[in-house]
Structures are given as structure tokens and as C-alpha cells.
Amino acid sequence: MTFSESDKNFMLRALELARAAKGRTFPNPAVGAVVVTAEGKAAGEGATGVYGGPHAEKNALKKAGAAARGGTLYVTLEPCSHFGRTPPCTDEIIKAGIKKVVTAVKDPNPLVGGKGMRQLKSHGIIVESGLLKNEAVIINEDFFWSITQKRPWITLKLAMTLDGRVADDQNASRWITSAQSRRFVQELRRCHSAIAVGKNTLLHDNPRLTARCGKTYFPARIVFSSDTDIPQDSYFFTNSHETRSIVVLRDSGNVKRISSKDNLEFWYTASLNYSESINAFLDMAYAESITSIFIEGGQRLASSFLEHGFVNKVHLFYGNKIFGKGKESLLFSRGLPVSNCLNLEKINHRSLGEDFLVSGYVKQLMYK
Amino acid sequence: MTFSESDKNFMLRALELARAAKGRTFPNPAVGAVVVTAEGKAAGEGATGVYGGPHAEKNALKKAGAAARGGTLYVTLEPCSHFGRTPPCTDEIIKAGIKKVVTAVKDPNPLVGGKGMRQLKSHGIIVESGLLKNEAVIINEDFFWSITQKRPWITLKLAMTLDGRVADDQNASRWITSAQSRRFVQELRRCHSAIAVGKNTLLHDNPRLTARCGKTYFPARIVFSSDTDIPQDSYFFTNSHETRSIVVLRDSGNVKRISSKDNLEFWYTASLNYSESINAFLDMAYAESITSIFIEGGQRLASSFLEHGFVNKVHLFYGNKIFGKGKESLLFSRGLPVSNCLNLEKINHRSLGEDFLVSGYVKQLMYK
């Protein structure tokens, strides 16, 4: 399939709309759509609304109104053809008289992928797909992962010194990175359906775990703890009304259960073994509509997830600081040899003022 | 002083020549010079030769020959006016009939700084200085430091994983960084008058400590050791004929002395206290014409120099690897608190393929 420069530009705009919507559509993917008239003029734009609200296609078609007739719809993901919380988008497209649909990528859900396009074709609509596919996949890489693997996408973030410390030898870590880096972390948080820390981090740092991006959406907050004793003066505890707040416990009991107390959910993973416990937690989280988790440490939580192969993507922030001694960023139970250690795929470097950020995918897990 | 675009371009070329000469002029600074005719045409270029050879000015004037008469000389450092291993450059300039001299920076040696310019002026030559001064200082920052402080300039290089390890938990470190980074390290070595490692690094890595940059110059090699027992199969030992090879020992004796055995020099610093011992070593090194040292680890040597405030500049290489456990890049005897830790000045980030390099100056020591 070859696409024109004009096709590309409209799709780039649709991708922009999708990116902007990221973080308020969970567990739906963030999608962007642009309606272009038969004369080649943009007539309406739209993005996915909050969960339960209209999809991108419907929003764009509504803006375009009668101008959509005979026109082209650019959309970053294959339109849905089934009833969910909203009616099928394919129906809306057919009704609006759209002549051609250009999509970036097929729906990754094996139950519905391809159906939308087939339905449109059966109504005589020209369907072209694959335009800027990679860009579209990246925006919803967590969605693509979770729907095919049936577990949440895991992003690990660490903020460390140049000598690889996440806290000084008094356990202080505020702040290792600059305000600019921390603002960027807010952006990253916003793009996940939950944020997780270990109980030690709660005790030492008392983080707010908020994504300051307007009041439309708060990611859920998760604390991994060895007991149910959550400090009552922690932000996590005192502000549990703001968003879903979950305490995850490893427990030797056989029953995994979800109970609620003080506005908190308590999840028991039914295993003392780290790897098994994380596995059980991920199953529970997916069942509870948590499709992506942003893990912010501390050392133990980060190391457990990474060592046991549960991390999809990492963001490593390095502040302009040297402690010389203190808490190591990661501490696996078994070190990896230089000849066979972890490498990041698609590694990316980015300067954030005096800080720098290394991002990449963990090899064995990277979404293909 | 204002300079024309043409002035700037000729000085940029002189700086380029100086940079290329870096590493083969010790203990002299690396200087570049360009002679321009009265008509504004480049007539001759030169750079400092190996120690004892002619200076940049003489080389450039020789190339220009009679064309220098009435012309301008661009030179990155104030011309010398005293007899050293070679006759004063000012005499050569006057003899050649140069009308104007443009320099980047004054000689930092307090005994001679300014004398060269005064002598030229007294012969009716126009002297302008300060053009691209910062660039000129950086090329010879080690020289500027050592001549004013009477001790060698210290550069610390560390090659670590993304989680801040310099070796895996079996002490293996070959290779943490990529071939591209290691080539760049060769370049950095070349620009120092000596390369130093600790004895453990010699035992584990057996590094060659060579700067592969032609056969004109080998930096001296230094090993810090707790005893005189240097492994006889180490490259350091077996190739000690290639260049000056020094073993530095902390020793409780009162006399610092230099003795020679097996083609190696043995230096005793006469103190078991780290800080005192390093101080004594730096005095000895400067007295022995070592004006800059490139420290490559291991952990103990690097940490001692950095913790005690002896490091001027650092180059931290991060390879695309995660060990999860292993030797920490730095381990001070006392950790620094987040509120008052080391920061790098003029920090610079650079991608080297998948690796990342952070360079900067250690605050309290930076050359002003």
C-alpha cells in the first residue's frame, strides 16, 4: 500500500490527537481520528473520550456533520464493529456516508481484529491500512500488550545518581533528579492506569503518586507491603478517596481475595515466593481492569519485577549528583554475568537539563 | 577588543591544529599557529612538536617563509619569550617581519605570562589577545592547572552498567561498554601524560593501558599497589619497555624515594593515610614532569581520588547493560548526603551508539 503526502499529514494529526488523549481512556486505547471532505479539507477531529464516552471516530464524525459525506476518515486504530459501552463505530462510519477509511493498525484483540475493516468493505467503503503503523502501536503499546497477553504492561522508572544510587546512606532521596525530570515523570505517570511503590518508599518518601494533569483522571495507586499496617499519616492513606488505592500483600494463605477497609483495597497474592506472587498479582490486576502499571521503586520492588522478567519498559533518570555510598538502584537476588546480562532494546537517550534519561524495552518482553 | 569574522576563522583553524597535537607535546601545552599574509591569505600552519622540538609559531613561520613579512600570526597561546629547550618564539616572530599577532590566551605561567606580548609590542608589533579564549583554555586545561597549582591534572574515567556497576559479581568487566566507547577512551588516554589503575584492575583485567594513536607517544603507566609484587605476566610488567612504568606504594617509612627494578620505577609515598598518600604522590608526579593523569579505576582508586577532592574532571561511560548485582562504581568511606553531595559543573551528555557518556568538572576543583 502506498500513501500520499497528504494521507501522511492527516494521519500524523490523528496520532497527535491520540497522544493527547493518552491517560484518560483506560482501559480503552487512546485513538485519534480526522474526517476529510471529498475536496481534501479537514472537516472534523476527535479522540477517544473517558471510559464509557464516545470513541474517536464518533467524535470526529459529529464535528464534521454533513461534510463527512463522500469523504475520508483517518483513524489510528481499526474502528470497532461490536457493542461495548458504546455502539459500533463502523455503523457510525457507514451512516455518515464516508467513502474511504485509512487506518494505522489493526485491532490487536484476536476476537475482533479485522472485523471492523471487513464490515466497512462489505458496505463498499475503501479501506487502506498500515499507514504509520509503528507510531500508532507505540502510543498504545500497553494496550496491545495487555489485550494479547492478558496481563498489565509494566513500566519501571528509577531516579538515581551518576554513581547508581537511589538514596543516600541515610535513605534520603529528595531530590536526586531535577524539577524538569520530575515534571516529565508526571507525564509518564499520566499514561498508566496505575502507579506502584513498595511500602519502604511510602515510609521514607511519602510520595503523592499523583499525575498532575487536570482533574479528569487519577491513576490507581498500589503499595506492595509485607503487612496491612499502612502508615495513617501517609498521603496514600489520607488521600485514598482521590482514586482507587490498593495494598498488595504476599500471603501464605491459599485464597486470593480482595477486601476493603478504610477505603483501601487489600489484595492477597497467596504466595510467599516473589515470582509466583508477582504472577498472581498481575492476573488479579488485569482481571480488575488495570492494564498498565508504572513502578517507581524502591529498590526491592523494582529489582523483583525486573529480575523475574515482568518489566516491559524502563525509564532510568540520572540526576547530576554523586553520593559515593548509599542504596544501589537495583539489587537482584542473583547477579547477572557480563556475558549474559540484561540489555535494553531500542535504547533511547534524552537530556533533561543537567539530568539524562535512558529509556528502552527489556529484551525478552518487548512487544513484537 | 573586537575581532573580524576572518580573524575568528583563522583562530578556529589554529585551535584545530592545537587539538590534533594534543598528547604528543607533554609537558608542553599543545599550541596551533597560522600565518596569514598582508593580503589575508593563509601562508603557513604549525603545531607544537614533540617535547624538545620546535613550537607551533616556528613551524608555521618556517612554512610561510618570506610570505610572513608584513603578515599576521594567529596563535592559540601567548608566544614564549624565554629560552627553554628551544629559542624564544618572540625572536622568530620579530625576525620574520610579522606585523600583527593575535593570541587566544595569555601564558598561565605566572613567571612568564604577559612577557611575550610586551616584548612583541616593544618591537612595534600589534598584539591583540583574547580571541576564542575559552576554547583555547579547554584544550590545555591540564597545562593551565598543573602550571599554576604545581600538581597534575586528574581525569577520572569510569565504565559502568546502567545500574552503576563496574564489574559483575564475579569481578568480570570485559566489556561493559561498546567498541565505540572504548575507541573514544583511547582518544582520552592520548591526551594525558600518564594513565593510572589500581593493582586489582591489573589482576582482573590486565589492561594494556595504551593509547593507540600512532607510535609517536605513549603515556606513562602507573599502578597503585599495596606491595611490590606486580604480576609478572601482566601487560604492564611484560611491556614496561614501551613507556615509563611506575608502581606507587603507600608506605609508613619516612623517606619518599624512587627506585628501579625490572625496568619499573617504584615510588613510595611515605604515608598509610589515603589523602596524605595521594597528596605526596601528586607532588612527586609533578616533580617528575607528569602533568596530567587519566585514572581508569578500579573502584578503590577512583573512590579515593574523588572522595579526597583530587579529581578535576570525570568521564562516566554507561554501557547498555544491567547486572542487578556486582561491584559498585564508587564506594566512598563516607557517603555524601543528598543535600550536600558532589555535582558536576559544565555537565555534558553525549551518545556513543547505545552507550552514554556524562562528562563534567568536579565543582571545588574546576579551573577558573
Image (cartoon, coloured by chain):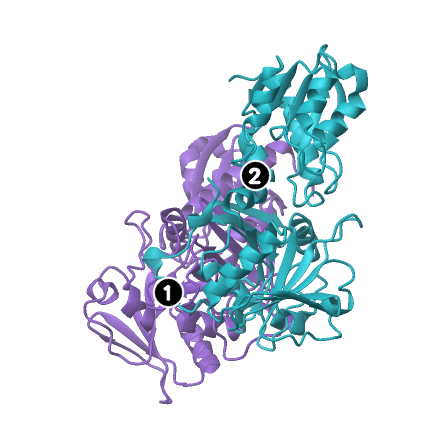
Chain colours: A purple, B cyan
Mark 2 or mark 1, whichever is nearer to me: 2
| Pointer 2 and pointer 1 on the same chain | no
Q: Nearer the viewer, residue B364 or B351?
A: B364
| Residue at the (70%, 57%) spot, across then down | B179
For numbered disc 1, what is the local secondary structure?
loop
The residue pinned by badge 1 equals A168
Relative to B329, is B156 above or below? above
Q: Nearer the viewer, residue B227 or A268?
A: B227
Q: Amino acid at mark 1?
A: Asp
One can see residue A75 in this view: no
| Residue at the (38%, 81%) spot, across then down | A269
Relative to B357, is A172 above or below? below
Q: Which chain letter goes with mark 2?
A: B
For numbered disc 2, what is the local secondary structure?
helix
Q: Which mark is residue B138?
A: 2
**x, y (%) of residue A246?**
31, 70
| Residue at the (44%, 37%) spot, across then down | A45
Please indicate whether residue A168 sits to the left or right of residue A145 in the image: left
Q: Which chain letter goes with mark 1?
A: A
Q: Nearer the viewer, residue A256 or A168?
A: A168
Label 2 crowd bin: few (<14), some (14–19), many (20+), radius 10 Å: few
Label 1 crowd bin: few (<14), some (14–19), many (20+), radius 10 Å: many
Task: Kindly report the distance in space between the C-alpha atoms of the residues bearing marks 2 and 1.
Answer: 33 Å
Location of residue B109 (image quadrant): top right
One can see residue B18 in this view: yes
Q: Amino acid at mark 2?
A: Ile
